[in-house]
Image: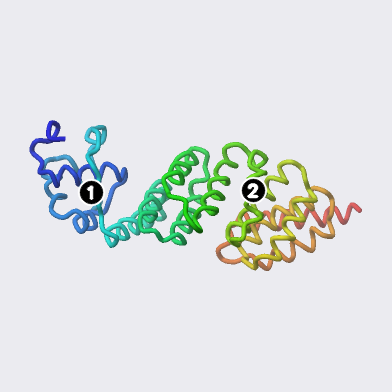
Amino acid sequence: WDKFFPELSSTEQQVLGELIRLQLPIQKSLAKSLFGTAIDGLQKHSLTEIIDGRVYVHDLVRQIALPSPIPLGKDKIKKLASYLQEYGRSMAVPFALLRATELLAQLGDETQVVQALEECWEWASALDLVEGYLKVLGRIPEKGLLDERLRLLSTQARVRLGGAGSQQENLEGLAKSSDSWTKEKALMSLMGAYADQGQHDKVIHTYETLTKLTDNPDLLLKAGSTALYTLVKTGRSTQAEKLARGLMGHLSRKSTPNQKADLHYLLARAYAQMGDA
């Protein structure tokens, strides 16, 4: 770095490396609270620019090899992770959520890491982001409670790459977990695996098992929709009508328009089948 940026102090070189490593713009006020006056020095040397209050590193600078990372204290890591989460949500940038998750993993809060990873999955489930998601998972140490939960999240991502059937055995193993979070999520994913393979009775049985384990309305709504589709598909209209009406009670303000539309559509299909009968 001395060869490329002889005009920079060693601190400025390290800070520039951190900004490149971050791969995302950062609010100038936060950058200064994390890295101090080095931020002004980098701007003075035209290596960064400020756009809408955020610090951006020039593209040509990004192509240079990175120096050793700066060790950040817990408070600074929390600040940076919180900013990245807020930025990722408000700007719909899944990669920011992934970077925030990597930072949170350094703090050792297992519950917080899993919650962040789960939120990442809601955003990163598009095929072009699954690889990045798996790379982040691979960099997080598996220990204690995290072990099975990380395996479950990894399996869910691999389902997206290769289809639910390819991971059915892994999901069946995770569904026997003593950890309720892992068990519930694995059962819900298993329903998709069984549905893909036309194992309709297993879909319904797995849903019934899930209802005995949790009263989480969001989880039951997602899993119940899969079970409802299976009932309609196999012509079990009476059961479908009963389930659809029960699922209506799980709808809330957080439910998406698609979830509501799907329920009404499947209920209408069930009624049509009953009329045909």
- Tell me which corner region of the image, top left, top right, bottom left or bottom right, holds residue 139: top left
Residue 254 against residue 155 in the figure, above or below: below
Q: Residue at x 26, y 32 (%)?
A: 63
Tell me, for residue 117, which label it has, or none: none
Residue depicted at 65% across the width and 54% down the height: 175
Q: Amino acid at mark 2?
A: Leu
Q: Nearer the viewer, residue 145 or 155?
A: 145
Q: Nearer the viewer, residue 240 or 142?
A: 142
Q: Which residue is mark 2?
A: 171
Q: Secondary structure at mark 1?
A: loop
Residue 179, image quadrant: bottom right
Q: Position of residue 2 (x, y in %)?
A: 12, 35
In the rendered image, which residue does mark 1 sit on? Answer: 70
Apparent side of residue 254 relative to residue 7 in the rendered image (left or right): right
Q: Quadrant of the N terminus?
A: top left
Q: Amino acid at mark 1?
A: Ile
N-term-proximal mark, 1 vs 2: 1
Q: Residue furthest front?
A: 144
Residue 20 image point, x, y percent: 26, 41
Q: How is the image coloured?
A: rainbow
Q: CA distance from mark 1 to mark 2?
A: 39 Å
Q: Is residue 211 above or below residue 151?
A: below
Label 1: how many Cα within 10 Å (few below 14, some 14–19, many 20+)? few
Label 2 packing within 10 angstroms: few (<14), some (14-19), many (20+): many
What is the number of callouts on the image?
2
Q: Is residue 34 left or right of residue 247?
A: left
Quick check: marks 1 and 2 in contact, CB under 8 Å? no
